[in-house]
Amino acid sequence: MSTNKHSSYREEAQKGIDSARLQSNLSNLQNRFGKGVMRYWEEMEDKGMRSRVKNARMRTFEHLDTILTELAKNVRARGGQVYFAETAQDAIDYTLSVARKQKVTKVVKGKSMTSMELDIDPALEKEGIEVVETDLGEYIVQLAGSTPSHIIAPCIHMDRKQIGELFADKLDIDYTDDPPTLTLAARKALREKLLSADMGITGCNLACAETGHVSLVSNEGNIRMATTMPKVHVALMGLERVVATLDEHREALQLLTRAAAMQKLSTYVSFSGGPSKKDDPDGPEEFHLVIIDNGRSKILADPEFREVLACIRCGACLNICPVYGKIGGHAYNYPYCGPIGAVLTPLLDGVNKHADLCKGETLCGACKDICPVNNDLPRMLSGLRQKLAYGSDRWNVKQHNLTEGYIYRLWRTITSNSFLYRTGVRLGRLIQRPFIGNNKLIEKMPSIGGAWTKDRDLPPIAPKTFAEIWRKKQRLKPTPAAPASREEK
Amino acid sequence: MSGKTVSLFIQCLVDTMFPETGTAMMTVFDRLGIPYDYPTGQTCCGQPAFNSGYHHDAAGAARHFIDVFEDAEVIVCPSGSCVHMVRHHYPELFKKEPEMHSRAVAVGEKTYEFTQYLVDELGFTDLQAEFSGSVTYHDSCHLHRGLGIFSQPRTLLNNVRGLEFIEMTDSDTCCGFGGTFSINYPEISTAMVDEKIENILASKAEVVTGCDISCLMNISGRLSRRKEKIKVLHIAEILAATGRGDR
């Protein structure tokens, strides 16, 4: 799903860079949460927790079929219904069939990245169903006709002035940029929707196989209302969201709220355990759990990328990534943005299609450091780049850039032979001559080099390379102090 | 102190564009009485190809590097990212070739970054250097996160006579170089280096230094385009200085 299908990563990135508002918001966000979480990891007493959770996640993946079967069994035992959706369309079709059967006219949504991945809203709206986001950030983005630009903070690209104007326009209130007043206005509008909706659609932060329940975290309480007030609750879950035991669930949940918002626990944690019963009146009349594959089993099957499924969607990598911090979430052109999006999106939606996501990072490694489950995102980005470099049948990837391929083949020949390398350096020294400016720097280069010299100067190849200086020094030395250098190979 | 002869691993950028960094390293080794040698067959470690995804082509450069450096007692390089490449990525490149893999691991284990070798392996903290001026330091990503080098350069800088060390804000945030990233996504790269430069300038230091010439090339290239006055020096050049007009 996307609203900016036709603009490239670079164009959207430039828009983000040019937005003073976005730059300031992202800088505040990263200073507070990115740095805060890194400090927490350094100071936390239980240093083994992160790898424990990671190991538990990876262990679960080894037996995912049986663990999902157990989850389904336990959900059904509580009176819930479970549907395994192979594709996004299957998940949409199932949800629509439930909506039709229950004659649903209004859906309230809890914040769900998976629902964005499925792009389920237009399908519901086509059936004449009103769809309302109830997470405040998502609600603002929906009213604005925009898309989320952060996994946890969807409207980080907006400021309160814009939100004030939006609310004045859409909610028919007097303009104000006072956050409490705006929040109250949203609350009032959302209460009406929550009270009149007949279906709640949420995601699933974690599902516990042992108990057969789904856990959802929020800080606004909207999810609790969306899951209990409408008569039907549909929880959309990527098949990797499952944890085997309640014990593993506890630790994963703790890491999630810490990494996401530096909270010991989020303000609300909702455990949805199925429909209400005679002796247990809380909950909806119907509970449906949709367990979605949509490309995940392909990731599961590839050891190179499997660990990306261990992600608990905390968004911490966005809060530290220096690239995301400059370009914002819209450049990623998919619901999952930032470093996690750069790895996950190509795997789910096509490596060639999202080549810029694979290549558009510096591999600085900050995302790896902050990841609560130690996911090595730079390694996987490098792996994706390899697929683009040479093509891959397994991932249905075509060689991305044939010219680049030839250049690196030539580069390989040159770097594998010191005579060719030295000759190349001498040749470069001749070619660069016309480009050296008065300040002894290269200020303008043709072709791809121009991308460097657009904003930066470049020192030329030196009149004497280190190797040449060394040779001269050796010649001048009567008896070498150090052992003679090895022959050129 | 170890009597091992150091094989100088002079990364391609230092060799071709910043030879003064290499000679500064020799000056330091001469002063400390560390024997060294320069295997003239060396070319490039393969990092540009590796980071662009051309792992098979990077393996070609890696094979050559291993051939050239295999007999070295110890290998020292004035660049963290190249050492990270040799130590951590070479073994990955040859994971399906057991013999090459063990050769790669052996070479990787004896490859050190310049400040890391001096402080961690040889136990130096004071190199008897003298440099007058205030200096701030940029933590290069692969050096810091990949090799865990953080305190070593600071220790050495803090013991330079006449040098006032100033920490900049976010010294460990990426400068935006990222190899071919800076050419493929110049606008993002520039936005990143500009933020780095704001932090450098805010430190009010006269010199910015680091242990990785590629990041310094990015920073200095942008500084010079912006016509900023602050000077950029590789750490070896500061540590080589003795205050006798050799700055």
Image: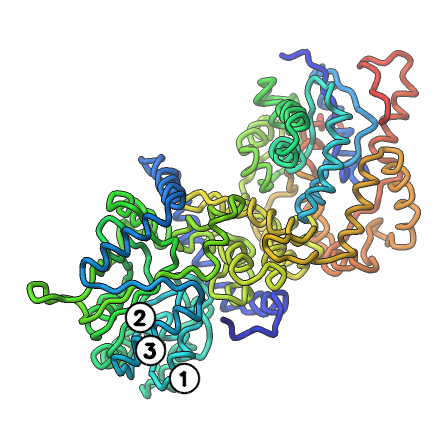
- Marks 3 & 1 on one chain: yes
Alpha carbon separation for disc pair 3 and 1: 14 Å
Q: Which residue is mark 1?
A: A126
The Cα–Cα distance between marks 1 and 2, rounded to whole angstroms, is: 16 Å
Name the residue located 46 percent from the left edge and 72 percent from the top edge.
Answer: A147
Q: Are marks 3 and 1 in contact (CB under 8 Å)?
A: no
Q: Identify which amino acid the numbered label 2 is placed on.
A: Ile
Residue B129 at least partly seen:
no
Indicate the quadrant containing the C terminus of chain B: top left, top right, bottom left or bottom right. top right
Q: Counting residues from the N terminus, which is met first, the one under dot 3 or under dot 1? A: 1
Question: The residue marked by circle 2 belongs to what chain?
Answer: A
Residue beneath disc 3: A132
Q: Which of the two discs, 1 and 2, labels the residue nearer the N terminus? A: 1
Amino acid type indicated by mark 3? Val
- SS class, disc 3: strand
x, y percent for residue A419: 89, 34
Give the residue at x 64% y 23%.
Answer: B106
- Tell me if residue B134 comes above or below residue A347 in the rendering: above
